[in-house]
């Protein structure tokens, strides 16, 4: 955990050397620009109505009272890109700064940043060959409004193209620890009215600032189906969305080997499914024709078929998982289809990660309810405890609600209804949208259906929540002090533990500080206390055990 930054930097540095001797093919990708001559590029001027409302012809952007930005855009691919970029220009620049600041945090050395830029150019050398031309045109239009502050990294177009692979890269390089999502579906006798209901948490974390300005995008393209997705400025791919036919897609990262070349980002694949599929069969056909570069479960719900399945994709394998004789489906971060029954990476991931634990916790919570309703679905997504209701500490990745999610979302595909969480995490009000209403009357002041909103979680007003937020701040400060070999007051370390008493990580951090300072008895006490808590993964347990063994040798115990 504390070694993740160092491991990541070393990995990038070593592959950068590889780039210097294997740069064949990079030049073409660096100079590729989509041909947009077939598209009209004329868009109206943006009109600012207020600091939270902007219009541009028949397209518009508004911030609702829950803090979510509601975007409606229509047109050909280039127009959609240009309109989206112009309407969200300020958010776009803010979002890119928030995301790229993580690079400075992980790779502070300017020399290594240079090597990283070279690596990214080499690593992404085939991405442009694996993204449909219409999406490259849209990204090109969008990139016209990107910040000029990062030209030293890559041109605006290439940079925004590369950022569409951030989700893929984030979970392939485990050290970045950006993802750990959980999804479920219920239908038939398991739902209140017999219709399909789907819930998911998108636990993609790239810093607090990154998650502040969520966009609920409603897109009316000239080709394909109208659709909505939960996204952020600068992103045309889909991580959670539903189209006008009631087909839904969400993505859950699987266990991947570190890929040596980027191909089709999963979010672009799911965008294509959402825009061009109306049935599960059509979704599978689209998924089969694209080459991905990481392992991913694509959770697909269908209003027409009134059920959900998962499409499990990876660079060298493909599977479809469909439950038999059941009316519920659960997906964490491991594969379940026969195609991956003998996959060593997947088997190891089930044994060593927190994916299976969250899967079992979801089973447990679904089993506590005879019929699932949207409110119950939201309650499940907000659950912060471990198996059997155990207190495992706030922020523990074994919980369904890890208190870091970019968003939680609930779908009722047959009714074309969707509920999207508002900040903080999944604790704010879940805002309801009716796709039939939105696309029938996209110019109305607010696109949400306030009468169907689900109330905010009272947990955000508790002392426990305030302590958790204080813990997150203090945690960063202590880790920074450890990294810089600075002194930390004993009272500060005690406060860190007291703020999140059931979380193993608090004791691990304290133990690490004492170990680095040579206070071995105090370190041993902290690590042994960590062992009494619910430690997240097998590698984490091994690290704790490793420290204990080293300390006992030093103390001759």
Image (cartoon, grey):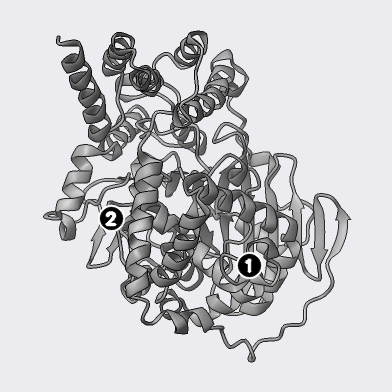
Residue at the left extreme?
342
Above or below residue 106? Residue 427 is: above
Residue 320 shown left or right of residue 368 in the figure:
left
- Dot 2, crowdedness within 10 Å: few (<14), some or many (≥20)? many
Residue at the bottom extreme?
38
Q: Do the residues labelled 2 and 1 touch (CB within 8 Å)?
A: no
352 or 132, which is in the foreground? 352
Residue 39: numbered disc = none
466 or 508, which is in the foreground? 508
Residue 368 quadrant? top left
Q: Where is residue 171 in the image (x, y as percent from the top left)?
A: 37, 51
State the residue position of label 2.
256
Residue at image coords 35%, 50%: 10
Q: Which of marks 2 and 1 is nearer the N terminus?
A: 1
336 or 101, which is in the foreground? 101
Residue at image coords 53%, 53%: 415
Asked if residue 181 can be seen in this view, the reply is no
Question: Please, what secondary structure does the residue beneath circle 1 have?
Answer: loop
Give the number of the mark in front: 2 or 1.
Answer: 1
Question: Please, what secondary structure does the residue beneath circle 2 have?
Answer: loop
Q: Position of residue 409 (x, y in %)?
A: 51, 45
Above or below residue 83? Residue 546 is: above
Q: In which quarter of the image is the N terminus?
A: top left
Residue at image coords 77%, 82%: 42
Q: Where is residue 233 in the image (x, y as percent from the top left)?
A: 64, 57
- Dot 1, crowdedness within 10 Å: few (<14), some or many (≥20)? few
Residue at image coords 63%, 91%: 38
Q: Where is residue 507 in the image (x, y as percent from the top left)?
A: 37, 17
Between the residue at mark 2 and the residue at mark 1, the CA separation in whole angstroms equals 31 Å
Residue 432 shown left or right of residue 527 in the figure:
right
State the residue position of label 1.
151
Residue 146 quadrant? bottom right
């Amino acid at each position: 955990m504390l070694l993740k930054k160092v491991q990541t930097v070393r990995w990038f540095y070593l592959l950068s050397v590889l780039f210097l001797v294997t740069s064949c093919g990079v030049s073409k990708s660096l100079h590729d620009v989509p041909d947009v001559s077939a598209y009209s590029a004329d868009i109206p001027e943006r009109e600012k109505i207020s600091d939270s409302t902007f219009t541009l012809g028949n397209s518009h952007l508004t911030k609702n009272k829950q803090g979510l930005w509601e975007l409606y855009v229509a047109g050909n691919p280039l127009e959609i890109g240009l309109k989206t970029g112009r309407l969200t220009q300020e958010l776009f620049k803010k979002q890119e700064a928030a995301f790229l600041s993580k690079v400075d945090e992980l790779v502070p050395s300017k020399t290594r940043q240079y090597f990283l830029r070279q690596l990214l150019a080499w690593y992404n050398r085939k991405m442009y060959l694996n993204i449909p031309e219409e999406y490259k045109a849209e990204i090109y239009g969008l990139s016209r409004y990107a910040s000029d502050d990062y030209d030293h990294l890559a041109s605006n177009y290439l940079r925004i193209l590369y950022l569409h692979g951030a989700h893929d890269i984030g979970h392939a390089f485990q050290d970045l620890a950006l993802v750990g999502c959980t999804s479920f579906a219920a239908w038939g006798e398991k739902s209140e009215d017999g219709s399909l209901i789907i819930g998911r948490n998108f636990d993609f974390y790239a810093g607090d600032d990154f998650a502040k300005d969520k966009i609920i995008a409603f897109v009316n393209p000239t080709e394909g189906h109208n659709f909505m997705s939960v996204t952020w400025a600068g992103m045309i791919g889909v991580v959670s969305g539903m189209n006008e036919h009631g087909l839904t897609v969400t993505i859950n990262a699987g266990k991947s080997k570190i890929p040596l070349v980027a191909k089709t980002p999963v979010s672009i694949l799911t965008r294509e499914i959402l825009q061009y599929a109306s049935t599960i069969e059509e979704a599978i056909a689209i998924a089969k024709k694209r080459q991905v570069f990481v392992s991913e479960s694509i959770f697909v719900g269908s209003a027409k078929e009134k059920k959900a399945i998962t499409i499990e994709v990876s660079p060298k394998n493909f599977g479809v998982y469909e439950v038999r004789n059941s009316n519920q489906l659960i997906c964490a971060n491991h594969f379940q289809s026969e195609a991956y029954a003998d996959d060593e990476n997947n088997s190891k991931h089930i044994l060593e990660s927190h994916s299976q634990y969250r899967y079992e916790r979801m089973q447990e919570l679904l089993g506590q309810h005879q019929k699932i309703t949207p409110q119950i679905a939201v309650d499940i997504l907000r659950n912060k405890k471990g198996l059997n209701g155990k207190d495992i500490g706030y922020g523990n990745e074994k919980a369904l609600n890890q208190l870091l999610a970019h968003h939680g979302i609930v779908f009722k595909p047959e009714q074309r209804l969707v509920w999207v969480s508002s900040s903080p995490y999944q604790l704010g009000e879940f805002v309801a949208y009716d796709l039939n209403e939105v696309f029938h009357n996209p110019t109305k002041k607010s696109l949400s259906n306030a009468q169907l909103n689900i109330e905010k979680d009272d947990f955000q007003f508790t002392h426990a929540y305030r302590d958790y937020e204080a813990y997150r701040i203090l945690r960063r400060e202590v880790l920074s002090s450890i990294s810089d070999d600075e002194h930390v007051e004993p009272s500060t370390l005690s406060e860190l533990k007291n703020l999140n008493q059931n979380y193993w990580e608090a004791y691990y951090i304290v133990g690490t500080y004492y170990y680095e300072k040579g206070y071995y008895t105090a370190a041993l006490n902290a690590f042994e206390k960590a062992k009494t808590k619910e430690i997240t993964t097998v590698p984490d347990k091994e690290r704790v055990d490793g420290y204990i063994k080293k300390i006992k040798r030093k103390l001759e115990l």
